[in-house]
Amino acid sequence: MPQPRILILRAPGTNCDGETAHAFALAGGRAERLHVNRLLERPEMLMEYQILCLPGGFSYGDDIASGRILASRLRHHLVEPMRRFREAGRLILGICNGFQILIQSGLLLDDDAQLGPPATLAWNASGRFEDRWVRLAVGGSKCVFLAGIETMYLPVAHGEGRFVVREPRLLDQLAHGGQLALRYAGAAYPDNPNGSTADVAGICDATGRVFGLMPHPERYVDPTQHPRWIRGEGSTPGDGFAVFANAVAYFR
């Protein structure tokens, strides 16, 4: 089978695209980094890929709010190509800033025509940027990216990662649909580093093929990336590797 092609979409301020491309390449994919302006010039090229990834960083400096400007560009100029991509059975992954973009663009959760996104990623409850390692638990079996994974240990690095919903019933709907794919393993700070409702660290869409998460799997694909690897802790490969391997395996 040919290598699945992965489009890693970047913008000014994106800074995790290199690590993400490396992770997909280790998993056997063919990753290519592309500036959003190139996709705006030729939206039809999106269908040349099997996987779309929105990596972490600070797209457009996170002016206004994290991910807001890039999400607006996608919503107003690329929404139809993105929807066709999703409906064609392809995979979409949003990591940290990418998760924020997926939420605000309407690609992950359906918007209300009047009220906008039904959930958001708000300022951390601590009131500061959180840069630490956290333990995570996988919920359900719907998410393609988390197949066969039960727990992970990954780093987070964000100022706006607190998952909140506009109406409590949405949380019930997501739980019932198996879409609360990833949770922080502890409810109290710092185990839940941002105060997310229901300890949510990542959610998927109803198909399980669109997934957004705040932790950074691309930052732990090699055992030496573990913060205590010189003490013999960690795994080979790193916990985050399976996220990318699952995506590549989906097309093989």
Image: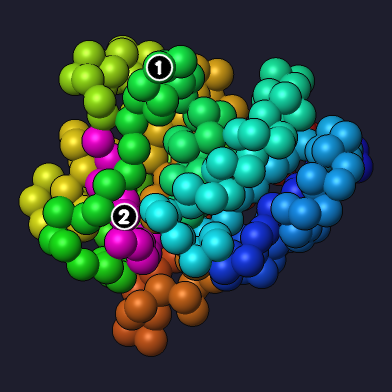
Q: Position of residue 209 (x, y in %)?
A: 59, 28
Marking on residue 160: 2
Q: Is residue 120 left or right of residue 101?
A: left
The boundaries of the magenta stretch are 154-164
Asked if 73 appears above or below 79 in the picture, the reply is below
Quadrant of res 201: top left
Q: Label 2 is placed on what type of residue?
A: Glu
Which residue is situated farthest in the bottom direction here? 230
Q: Position of residue 129 (x, y in %)?
A: 27, 68
Q: Nearer the viewer, residue 108 or 118?
A: 118
Q: Residues within 10 Å of mark 1 (few under 14, many from 20)?
A: few
The residue at 53%/35% (across/down) is 105
Residue 179 visible in image: no
User: Which of the image's four quarters has the N terminus?
Assistant: top right
Q: Residues within 10 Å of mark 2 (few under 14, many from 20)?
A: many
The residue at 36%/21% (across/down) is 115
Q: Which residue is mark 1?
A: 114
The residue at 31%/51% (across/down) is 161
Mark 2 vs 1, N-terminal side? 1
The residue tagged with tag 1: helix, strand or loop? loop
Q: How many marks?
A: 2
Q: Position of residue 25 (x, y in %)?
A: 74, 60
Q: Nearer the viewer, residue 161 or 204?
A: 161
Q: Is residue 249 left or right of residue 114?
A: right
Quadrant of res 120: top left
Give the spatial CA distance, label 2 vs label 1.
24 Å
The residue tagged with tag 2: helix, strand or loop? loop
Q: Nearer the viewer, residue 68 or 171?
A: 68
